[in-house]
Image (tube, helix red, strand yellow):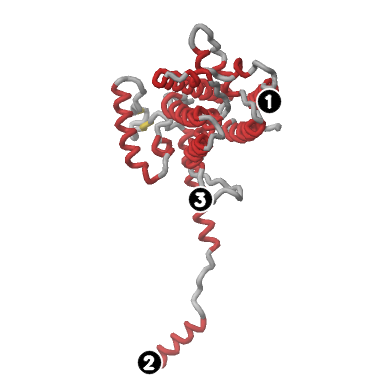
Amino acid sequence: MQKVSIATKAFCAILIVFYLLSFVPGVEENLAMTPSYIVPPKVKIWTLVTATFYENRIIFVLLDLIALVGLSGVLHPLWSLKEYLVFTGVVATVSVLSGTVLCLFLYFVTQNMTIIFSNFHGLVGLVCGYIVAVKQFYPDSTLSPPPVPPTLRVKHVPLLVVLTYLLLSLCKVVSPTVCWLSLSGTLTAWTYLRFFQPREQGGRGDMTEEFAFATLLPEIVQPPVAAFSHALYNVLVATKLCPKAAQMYSMDEPSSIKITLPGMNPADAQRRQQRALKALDERLSKTEQAPPTWPSLEDNSQDEAGVIGA
């Protein structure tokens, strides 16, 4: 636990305390998100924050603790504490807010009162956001534990988690709103990291092709999705709802032109260099493991004898 940051320890403590409070009557409606309590006259705005860390089933608490410690342990060496807290706050709040808006919309369409008086909660949206952040840095890394197929890579995990919660929702293990939280957390994290996260060298977001929206989906559907997302991006830029990935030119050196794109800072370049070196090391190791093939002395002597005899 020494390598776990104080922020992660605090989040784990909140999870445990909220779980213990779930046994107290009346606590759930004050910690979980109830869509009807987000609008007057009975407003509980703080549940936008507390709903993420409230869980009343021990199995989900344990899974949340494992995911929180494991994923934050990967992200902390790459981010500052401020970046980690800002990302956590954005993903947690927006995912819960989007779930609330969805419930209110469904109520206006169906007039079903149960939708807005049923609460939802859980860390799933934030966990999915952390997975997207890990995918940003290590997209091609393989998952090595024995139960995991050797071909499964980090870039496949976000979609796999969303599909898992969809299956659990269809089996009525979790509510449909929790499934929506997993999707919302994934999309919120990608949007923030893609367009809005501040960079040390200036600019915002990660506009590299390796972090495009299509990379969240299977490779077979990436080309049409990439074309659609590119067209949608141009529309959002034209309506000023999304920042433009403008190029910046530096003429400091007369013999060269330096071109920098938002998201293409030294950290990104180093990330690519590390992946390239890793791939090169793997190729070299395979070459070294292959046994060298030397010509046989017997074959050479037979060839020489044939030449003399001729």
Q: How many marks?
A: 3
Task: Tell me the quadrant of the picture where the N terminus can be found.
Answer: top right
User: On the picture, is 8 further left or further right than 309?
Assistant: right
According to the image, label 2 marks what residue?
310
Q: Which residue appears farthest toward the bottom when viewing the image?
A: 309
Helix, strand or loop for disc 3:
loop
Q: Which residue is mark 3?
A: 151
Inter-mark Cα distance, 1 to 2: 90 Å
First of labels 1, 3 by sequence position: 1
Along the horizontal axis of the image, is 16 left or right of 293? right
Mark 2: secondary structure: loop
In this view, the residue in front, 182 or 26, is: 26
Question: Camera-side residue: 207 or 268?
Answer: 207
Which amino acid does the dot numbered 1 rest on? Ile
Using residue 239 as the reference point, say whether residue 90 is left or right of it: right
Tell me the CA gap for discs 1 and 3.
35 Å
Which marked residue is nearer to the observer: mark 1 or mark 3? 1
The residue indicated by pointer 1 is 16
Seen at 32% across and 24% down, the residue is 236
- Residue at 45% x, 31% y is 265
Residue 294 at least partly seen: yes
Q: Residues within 10 Å of mark 2 (few under 14, many from 20)?
A: few
Q: Position of residue 123 (x, y in %)?
A: 57, 28
Could you tell me residue 120's position as x and y percent?
55, 23
Q: Secondary structure at mark 1?
A: helix
Amino acid type for the residue under numbered disc 2: Ala
Foreground of the two, 249 or 65:
65
Q: Is residue 248 visible?
A: no
Q: Position of residue 107 (x, y in %)?
A: 43, 19
Q: CA distance from mark 3 to mark 2?
A: 57 Å
Q: Which of disc 2 and disc 1 is earlier in sequence?
A: 1
